[in-house]
Amino acid sequence: LEKNSQIPNLFKMGTSENFGDYFTEMTPMDGFYPTGEMGAVPRDSMEEGYGKLLRYVTFTDSFAISQEMIEDSKLMNLTDKPRAFMDGYHDTREQFAAAIFGAALRGQKSFNFRGMNFDATGADGQSLFHTAHAPKTKGEKQSNCFSNEFSVDALDRAEAAMQQFTAEKNKQLTIAPDTIVIANKPSLKRKVFAAIGSDIDPVESTHAFNYQYGRWNVIINPFWNRFISKDSEPWMLMDSKFNEKYGGAMWIDRVKLTIDSVKQYSPAANVWHGRSRFIAGFRNWRAFCAGGMAGGTDLTTMKL
């Protein structure tokens, strides 16, 4: 299961030795100005941008093998329970990763996972997908939350919108989305591969070249089905390089899975305990945009 995990494809991975970590960034400088001969040199500056605190959460589980099973050497029980225990650990991580993105795709700022509440906001305090992300210092509000259902036209426009994202002070970025992420929905898979699977325009009859062909990685995540609205078909674009560099979505492991066993006598059994500490969170919304979002911005009305 770990080898097939989608977590490294969607999160910037890291480790830590702290109770929690605060992630921040500095705003860009304004840049150089033309200066006349012997003219006064302008003084540039940087400020701290939005920050995000991630506190690590402990996840635990246990199982028992009865003394009778051990005495009778019931091989099936002695091997299947530990295997299921490990599968449960990796399944929990995949579900947690899907739950935080599911909350974002529902426009929520938090979510409940197995009885505990978790934060799903970015460093700016808004939900990951929002129509008015505001800068901390100065600049224009920006949307990465779009209402349009998936189509080749919506893909064209969403890609262009991401390429126009700016940092603080309206500094132009060089975002290049390269990944499409969807849940395991047959109709949505059909739309995505119809849009990117041929070098011929899938809409027009002119046989014009389809420049979306061969340019995208596609992730189909079946865990997302559990955490998005049943009748919705949200889709997400991601710049994987920007995500890795600036931590759009972050996954930090504090303590890798540790397992120990204790022999108890009442009832007689060998009890196995597993423990791990990790957390996931969003930081920089610019690594992503989402379509098919209720209340999102209509891409056809944007000046691109």
Image: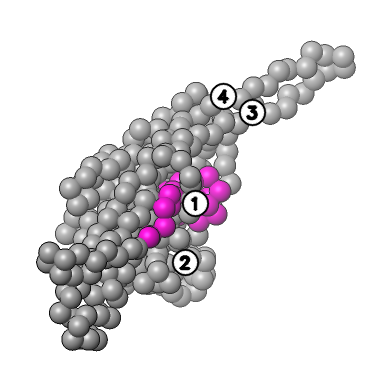
Q: Nearer the viewer, mark 1 or mark 2?
A: 1
Residue under label 1: 14
- Side of 60 where 10 appears, left or right: right
| Span shown in magenta | 238-258
Q: Earlier in the sequence, mark 4 or mark 2?
A: 4
Q: Taking the image as drawn, is residue 157 in sight? A: no
Crowding at label 3, few (<14), some or many (≥20) Cα neighbours within 10 Å?
A: some
Q: Amino acid at mark 1?
A: Gly
Tell me whether the residue at label 1 lies in contact with that at label 4, contact meaning CB atoms closer than 8 angstroms: no
Establish if 204 lies above or below 44: below
| Secondary element at tag 1 | strand
| Secondary element at tag 2 | strand
Q: Earlier in the sequence, mark 2 or mark 3?
A: 3
Q: Position of residue 208 (x, y in %)?
A: 50, 70
Q: Position of residue 246 (x, y in %)?
A: 53, 45
Tell me whether the residue at label 2 lies in contact with that at label 3, contact meaning CB atoms closer than 8 angstroms: no
Residue under label 2: 217
